[in-house]
């Protein structure tokens, strides 16, 4: 999927604030034009909210957000299965895809990655540059990922937090995970991790904070993080049902719940959500891996960050207890 095919979340005119913390920062880049440069459908959302003046400017600025990534290399793909079920938590039928790694299939006991999609996406395109079957067959730097399965599911546009009559978080922990465990995926002693991009990155943080005994590791790419409810509601009125809900599900102030959980977070220096991710980085455990590097809220940055995020999860989900 290209970034032009993806409808991303409503991005407001974020201020960059006081500068960036250097604590636990892996890399830094110069970037371009401080938080306003995006591409494709993401750029359309910015234009709609008055951040950028129009398509011509988007086209001119597009190149400043390019992030180089090595070509993807995959082993022969394992099987995958897609289907639907009626979610009591979401009060609707949802779709899902489960993918097994090469050399494995249904019935095998494996760790599990719950991959959360971004705003406007669904279980079919939760990853930017590959399918779930490709993701678990990926070679990262010439090294195969350890065997683990992946599941994606339709979470809607509610940022994976509970809303009246639609609770995607409960769907994941109360319906999806039990379904996968019935297939021998993520069943103890096998572990479960969570990963997400943008809205899904926020969701991965939220799930791991709310259920630290369930999710053994998390990786968030360009998480859509706001620091105040007025900021969030001005950008996307449907993200949180109320100020109280925002406070309850604020991944910055509740990051202390991640103590003991392996965490990897990546954000582009020119991502409009970057100030929120900087605030988050200041509250994460000192062991967290935080990668701030050149990039925007675009497909090229997401694509570049998917392999190291999967490698991070693979290392922690398959390490000896």
Image: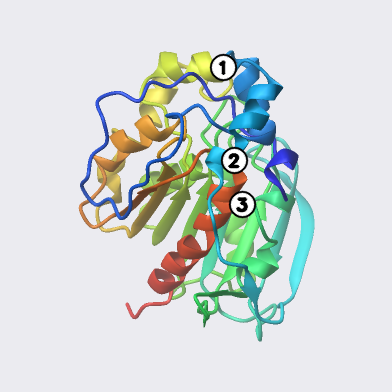
Neighbor class of circle 3 (other Cα within 10 Å; few <14, some 14-19, many 20+) is some
Q: Is residue 26 above or below residue 144?
A: above
| Residue 120, image quadrant | top right
Choose the circle earlier in sequence order: 3 or 2: 2
Residue underneath mark 1: 237
Residue at 36% in and 53% down: 212
Please tell me which residue lies in front, 255 or 212: 255
Neighbor class of circle 1 (other Cα within 10 Å; few <14, some 14-19, many 20+) is some
Q: Secondary structure at mark 3?
A: helix
Where is residue 130 shown, x and y percent of the image?
Answer: 68, 60
Label of residue 63 in the image: 2
| Residue 134, image quadrant | bottom right
Choose the circle earlier in sequence order: 3 or 1: 3
Task: Nearest to the eye among marks 3 and 1: give it.
Answer: 1
Q: Secondary structure at mark 1?
A: loop
Where is residue 164 shown, x and y percent of the image?
Answer: 58, 24
Residue at 28% in and 55% down: 288
Task: Nearest to the eye among marks 3 and 2: give it.
Answer: 2
**Left or right: residue 197 compared with residue 79:** left
Neighbor class of circle 2 (other Cα within 10 Å; few <14, some 14-19, many 20+) is few
Residue underneath mark 3: 175
């Amino acid at each position: 999927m290209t970034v032009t095919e993806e409808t991303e979340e409503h991005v407001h005119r974020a201020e960059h604030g006081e500068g960036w913390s250097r604590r636990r920062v892996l890399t830094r880049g110069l970037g371009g034009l401080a938080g306003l440069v995006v591409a494709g459908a993401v750029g359309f959302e910015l234009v709609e909210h008055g951040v950028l003046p129009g398509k011509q400017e988007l086209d001119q600025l597009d190149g400043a957000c390019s992030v180089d990534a090595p070509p993807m290399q995959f082993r022969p793909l394992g099987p995958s299965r897609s289907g639907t079920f009626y979610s009591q938590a979401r009060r609707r039928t949802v779709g899902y895809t489960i993918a097994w790694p090469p050399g494995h299939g249904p019935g095998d006991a494996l760790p599990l990655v719950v991959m959360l999609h971004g705003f406007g996406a669904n279980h079919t395109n939760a990853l930017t540059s590959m399918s779930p079957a490709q993701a678990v067959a990926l070679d990262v730097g010439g090294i195969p990922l350890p065997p683990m399965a992946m599941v994606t599911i339709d979470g809607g546009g509610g940022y994976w937090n509970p809303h009246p009559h639609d609770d995607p978080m409960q769907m994941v922990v109360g319906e999806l995970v039990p379904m996968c465990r019935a297939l021998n995926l993520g069943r103890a002693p096998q572990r479960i991790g969570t990963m997400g991009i943008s809205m899904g990155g926020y969701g991965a943080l939220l799930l791991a904070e709310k259920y630290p005994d369930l999710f053994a590791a998390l990786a968030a790419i360009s998480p859509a993080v706001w620091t105040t409810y007025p900021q969030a509601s001005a950008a996307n009125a449907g993200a949180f049902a109320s100020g109280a809900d925002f406070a309850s599900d604020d991944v910055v102030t509740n990051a202390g719940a991640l103590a003991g959980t392996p965490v990897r977070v990546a954000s582009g220096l020119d991502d409009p959500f970057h100030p929120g991710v900087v605030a988050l980085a200041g509250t994460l455990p000192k062991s967290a891996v935080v990668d701030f590097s050149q990039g925007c809220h675009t497909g090229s940055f997401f694509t570049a960050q998917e392999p190291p995020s999967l490698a991070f999860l693979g290392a922690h989900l398959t390490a000896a207890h």
